[in-house]
Image (spheres, rainbow, N blue to C red):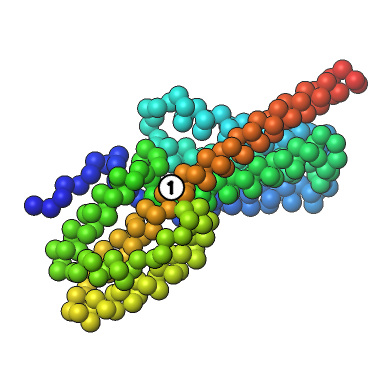
């Protein structure tokens, strides 16, 4: 009998390939097209104009949703129809789109409190991209970050199937193993280590074929095992980097929204009481 399949909530999947980034790009392109049409007819909308205020309000609301909804899902809404990864994708889309609207709202004017807000918004978005890169270093379950035991189980299942195909597992491990660098370096330099692993993988597959082991299933299993092993090595480093990133990103968001509320309050005050 084969090893039973793990429950759906525990199954691992490779990192997403940026679907949320494509959606964000489409939204940015659409907004740019509408904004450019407005510029052709009325000129660049000033921050204090009706269109400028509209860009700022919608952008701020999207960024507020970015901060509130994902935090709510992680901390309080334990049971949800959508898995955590879907909320994260929504978090990324609203964050990028909202920040772009805020940038258009500034109309290229970066002085005073508004200038600091625009700069902080750009830094926060850049920090978000760094966080996403770190977050995708290892696969996820539907409930969030994979644990070491889950990765080990996946590797054990791949080893079992390779053994059923008559593959020398010890030789395969030796041929595909990479000298383990520090965990954080493995995460940050992921493209480089994946390239090195592919080179070792080609040699391993060639040697296995010379030994009489061949077939698409074999290649798929060996590639899967190598990918899981690399992710296993990077798991500790990923957790450390995510903790460091949270230490920087969360306070940055607090400062950003504090200044944003001050900016909104000042704008309402001068627009209402100083006229």
Which residue is identified by label 1? 236
Kindly indicate the quadrant of the structure image that contains residue 144.
top left
Q: Residue furthest left?
A: 1
Camera-side residue: 137 or 93?
137
- Name the secondary structure under disc 1: helix
Q: As displayed, is residue 42 above or below residue 193?
A: above
Q: Position of residue 245 (x, y in %)?
A: 57, 42
Residue 131 visible (yes or no)? yes
Residue 101 visible (yes or no)? no
Kindly indicate the quadrant of the structure image that contains residue 82.
top left
Image quadrant occupied by the C terminus: top right
Q: Residue furthest top?
A: 273
Look at 55% across and 46% down and name the residue there. 131
Q: Position of residue 153 (x, y in %)?
A: 25, 49
Q: As displayed, is residue 264 above or below residue 149?
A: above
Look at 73% across and 30% down and name the residue there. 260
Q: Position of residue 195 (x, y in %)?
A: 45, 69
Look at 72% across and 40% down and name the residue there. 120
Q: Position of residue 28 (x, y in %)?
A: 63, 49
Quick one: label 1, few (<14), some, or many (20+) residues within 10 Å? some
Camera-side residue: 66 or 136?
136
Q: As displayed, is residue 268 above or below residue 119?
A: above
Q: Residue furthest right?
A: 275
Look at 20% across and 79% down and name the residue there. 211
């Amino acid at each position: 009998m084969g090893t039973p399949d793990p429950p759906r909530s525990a199954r691992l999947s490779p990192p997403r390939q940026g679907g949320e980034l494509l959606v964000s790009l489409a939204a940015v392109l659409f907004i740019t097209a509408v904004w450019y049409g407005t510029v052709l007819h009325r000129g660049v909308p000033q921050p204090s104009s009706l269109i400028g205020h509209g860009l700022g309000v919608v952008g701020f609301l999207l960024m507020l949703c970015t901060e509130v909804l994902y935090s709510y899902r992680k901390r309080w809404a334990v049971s949800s129809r959508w898995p955590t990864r879907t909320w994260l994708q929504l978090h990324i889309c609203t964050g990028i789109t909202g920040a772009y609207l805020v940038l258009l709202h500034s109309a290229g004017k970066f002085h005073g409190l508004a200038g600091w807000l625009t700069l902080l918004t750009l830094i926060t978005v850049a920090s978000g991209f760094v966080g996403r890169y770190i977050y995708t270093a290892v696969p996820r379950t539907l409930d969030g970050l994979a644990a070491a035991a889950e990765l080990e189980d996946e590797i054990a299942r791949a080893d079992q199937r390779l053994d059923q195909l008559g593959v020398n597992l010890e030789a395969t491990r030796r041929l595909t193993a990479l000298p383990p660098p520090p965990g954080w370096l493995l995460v940050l330099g992921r493209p480089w280590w994946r390239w090195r692993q592919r080179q070792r993988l080609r040699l391993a597959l060639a040697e296995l074929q010379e030994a009489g082991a061949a077939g698409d299933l074999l290649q798929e299993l060996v590639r899967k095992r190598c990918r899981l092993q690399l992710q296993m090595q990077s798991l500790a480093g990923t957790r450390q980097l995510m903790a460091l990133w949270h230490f920087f990103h969360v306070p940055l968001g607090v400062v950003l929204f504090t200044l944003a509320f001050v900016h909104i309050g000042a704008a309402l005050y001068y627009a209402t009481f100083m006229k």
